[in-house]
Amino acid sequence: MNRAPIGIFDSGIGGLTVVKEIEKRLTFEDIIYFGDTARVPYGSKSDEIIKGFSLQNSLFLLKFNVKLIVIACNTASAVALDYLKSLFKVPIIGVIEPGVVSALNKSKTKRIGVIGTYSTINKNAYGRLLKERNQSAEIFSVPCPLFVPIAEEGIADEKFVDLIVEKYLSQLKDKNIDTLILGCTHYPILKKPIKKFIGENIELVDSAEETAKAVERILSINSIKNGEKAKGKTHFFISDIPYRFREMGSKFLGREISKVAAVHQDVFGNYYT
Ligand code: DGL
């Protein structure tokens, strides 16, 4: 048993979809969330920059003695997971592996689509791991960069979004996929228009849900669940308070965010509150 909090970081507010699922599944755990809102998006940045930011975010979380770090960001998971694992002893998980496990469980034909940011798709982290776990899997990947601002603006239900979904996903239409991985924190917000275009019969894999299950497994295996039977608390830290933060954040989290602290960074990458 371990009463230390779980640390979660993301490039911004998208990782709140992961917090939502972890809060739902692990009600007695405390959570420290760090969203790097000052430097988002990560999805179009170079590997070196993403690794550096991920290191700084982890060091910030470790100040709270977190017992586990969850990289809620698909881009940072694709680029920096192995790097961070090589540096720290604390268990660290990303969102890619849980998504892959779930996709392979759900898919009957093993023809699997993956959508994500430019960085995630170029890195082919989902594709490589899917192939490693099942050599006969056929992977079809498409970057969908505009889905991020659509989710943040809260306009996923607008009619024009159907056209953007069609522009990106039409490449997947003739590929006979039976499963589609939503490989970005923001994409669960667009489930409805995606499903409408790609077909109700296609299984959508939401990495947030799968990551929460994986976190539960790791806490159990390592016997580090919080033994206290009191409702856990989540503390939110972000590196900037962007315009409409509360409104956007509560959309991703599915509830109001009562308190949030802004953490600033000096030119050397050290955080201070
Ligand atoms: N959190 C990022 C991801 O899941 C999306 C936003 C960004 O580009 O930073 O890939």
Image: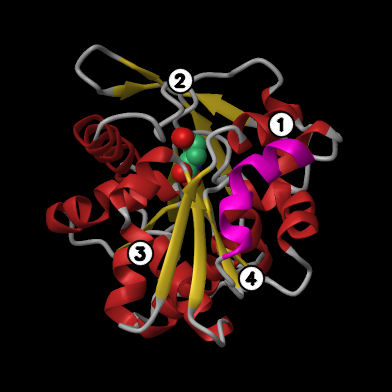
Q: Which mark is residue 145?
A: none
User: Which numbered tag is attached to residue 25?
Assistant: 4
Q: Residue at x 22, y 33 (%)?
A: 52
Which amino acid type corresponds to the residue marked 2 in the rendered image?
Ala
Question: How much space separates mark 2 and mark 1, taking CA atoms?
Answer: 15 Å
- In what element is the residue under mark 1? helix
Q: Nearer the viewer, mark 2 or mark 3?
A: 3
Residue 257 visible from this viewpoint: no
Identify which residue is drawn at 71% across, 60% down. Answer: 198
The amino acid marked with disc number 4 is Arg
Q: CA distance from mark 4 to mark 1?
A: 23 Å
Position in image of residue 67 (x %, y %): 35, 61
Q: Are marks 4 and 2 in contact (CB under 8 Å)?
A: no
Find residue 111 and report its horizontal and vertical position in percent. 50, 75
Q: Nearer the viewer, mark 4 or mark 2?
A: 2
Which residue is identified by label 1? 248
Q: Amino acid at mark 3?
A: Gly
Q: Nearer the viewer, residue 221 or 230?
A: 221
Q: Residues within 10 Å of mark 2 (few under 14, many from 20)?
A: some
Q: Label 3 vs label 1: CA separation?
A: 31 Å
Where residue 127 is drawn, which disc sits there?
3
Q: Which mark is residue 38?
A: 2
In this view, the residue in front, 52 or 207, is 207
Of the two numbered discs 4 and 2 on the same chain, state the one appearing first in sequence.
4
Q: Earlier in the sequence, mark 4 or mark 3?
A: 4
Give the mark, 2 or 3, whose residue is nearer the N terminus.
Answer: 2
Q: Amino acid at mark 1?
A: Met
What is the magenta range? 162-174
For the N terminus, which image quadrant? bottom left
Single out the mark in the foreground, 3 or 1: 3
Q: SS for tag 2? A: loop
CB under 8 Å between discs 2 and 3: no
